[in-house]
């Protein structure tokens, strides 16, 4: 009995509960528990429950989304994003699942760029190129974390101080990622970055989605809309050629709903380079919603809203079943897809692309919303 009491006390001490608004069906809240330790810092798991009783889980390891539990048409709830049963599993698993990726999401050709005549060299971790901020990028940082009190909805703020020359990038950068879980089942992500030296920046979230529920088959039957008339054509190492190609008449036309799998096997140069879809679409930015993803069996719909110039649609082509996720289920080929909002790959080497330069005294802010509903 005494032992049970002690254990209960320890568990209570590990868990800090912060309540938000209390009216409505459920009590919206955030709980925090210890998840592990890494690089000498404590890693936490945050559970955000909105008034609908739907759950979003986050961790400060990589400022990650690890769990999104939303209902299907009949009200059955299921987690629709990739993650692992334990923190140890996460450390062994795919480096990017659900993570905030920086300083530079996607690739920089040959790991080199020049600013004001100074050439910077980055670690090569993807063939001849540098990918996702290098092996020690923000996905692998243990961010500082705080539950934001007195907000309308459950909110957690992650902060990272990225030191000058971290993974080869100049400038001390202060980075904030704030996640809010609204009662309309919207994950609202607010990014804010400042630097003390001229540098480059492309920040995104790398969550994988499967609206059948993570681990339940592939995403080839999902219907996708991307409001983009052009996409960024790439070479065989997935570096932009400089061409912004019209989607019309190609397998890249998602301006009206199309199944992900309908044209993914076509004999088309860009499909071959990507081994499927692995391309940035140039967002039209004319309507509120930039992308929508619909899974007809469950009726789940995910809408993506972004203020950024592009979205990287990656159809999970490199997943091969070797990683094991929640409930022992393997992440098979194309069992999840990503819609990563941000700038174009390799922009520092393409002066005609929207700029990714951040100067001292400027504040970069950006918002991405992933909104879940049924239809
Ligand atoms: C995506 C990228 C893919 C692959 C993936 C991580 O953002 O476009 O090529 O690197 O991340 O496995």
Image: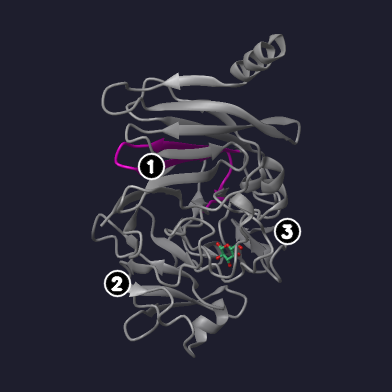
Determine which residue is flagged by label 3: 123
> What residue appears at the point 32 percent right and 47 percent down from the top-left corner?
75
Determine which residue is flagged by label 1: 188
> What residue appears at the point 69 percent right and 64 percent down from the top-left corner?
322
Dot 3: few (<14), some (14–19), or many (≥20) neighbours within 10 Å? some
| Measured Cα–Cα span from mark 3 to mark 1 | 32 Å
Q: Please give the count of numbered marks on the rendered protein.
A: 3
Disc 3 within 8 angstroms of ligand 1 (CB): no
- Above or below — where is 76 with respect to 217? above
Outermost right residue: 40
Query: Viewer-nearest of labels 2 and 1?
Result: 2
> What residue appears at the point 27 percent right and 73 percent down from the top-left corner?
256
Hey, which quadrant is residue 34 in on the image? top right
Q: Earlier in the sequence, mark 3 or mark 2?
A: 3
Hey, which quadrant is residue 297 in on the image? bottom left
Q: Earlier in the sequence, mark 3 or mark 1?
A: 3
Magenta region, mostly helix, strand or loop?
strand
């Amino acid at each position: 009995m005494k032992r049970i009491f002690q254990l209960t006390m320890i568990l209570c001490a590990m868990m800090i509960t912060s309540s938000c608004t209390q009216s409505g069906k459920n009590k919206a809240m955030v709980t925090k528990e210890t998840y592990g330790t890494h690089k000498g810092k404590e890693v936490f798991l945050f559970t955000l429950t909105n008034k609908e009783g739907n759950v979003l889980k986050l961790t400060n390891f990589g400022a990650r989304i690890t769990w999104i539990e939303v209902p299907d048409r009949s009200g059955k709830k299921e987690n629709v994003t990739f993650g692992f049963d334990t923190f140890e599993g996460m450390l062994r698993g795919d480096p990017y699942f659900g993570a905030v990726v920086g300083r530079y999401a996607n690739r920089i050709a040959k790991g080199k760029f020049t600013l004001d005549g100074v050439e910077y060299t980055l670690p090569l971790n993807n063939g001849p190129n540098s990918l996702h901020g290098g092996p020690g990028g923000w996905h692998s940082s243990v961010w500082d974390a705080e539950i934001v009190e007195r907000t309308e909805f459950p909110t957690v703020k992650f902060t990272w101080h990225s030191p000058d020359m971290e993974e080869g990038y100049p400038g001390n950068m202060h980075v904030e990622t704030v996640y809010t879980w609204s009662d309309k089942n919207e994950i609202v992500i607010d990014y804010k970055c400042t630097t003390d030296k001229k540098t480059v920046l492309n920040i995104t979230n790398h969550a994988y989605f499967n609206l059948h529920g993570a681990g339940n088959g592939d995403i080839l039957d999902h219907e996708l809309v991307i409001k983009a008339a052009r996409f960024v054509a790439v070479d065989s190492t997935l570096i932009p050629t400089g061409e912004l190609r019209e989607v019309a008449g190609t397998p890249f036309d998602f301006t009206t709903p199309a199944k992900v799998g309908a044209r993914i096997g076509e004999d088309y140069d860009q499909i071959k380079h990507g081994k499927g879809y692995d391309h940035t679409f140039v967002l039209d930015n004319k309507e509120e919603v930039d992308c929508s993803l619909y899974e007809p069996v469950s009726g789940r719909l995910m809408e993506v809203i972004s203020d950024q110039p592009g979205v990287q649609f990656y159809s999970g082509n490199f997943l091969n079943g070797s990683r094991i996720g929640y409930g022992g289920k393997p992440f098979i080929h194309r069992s999840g897809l990503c819609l990563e909002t941000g700038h174009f790959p390799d922009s520092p080497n393409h002066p005609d692309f929207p700029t990714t330069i951040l100067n001292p005294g400027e504040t970069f802010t950006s918002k991405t919303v992933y909104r879940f509903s049924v239809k």
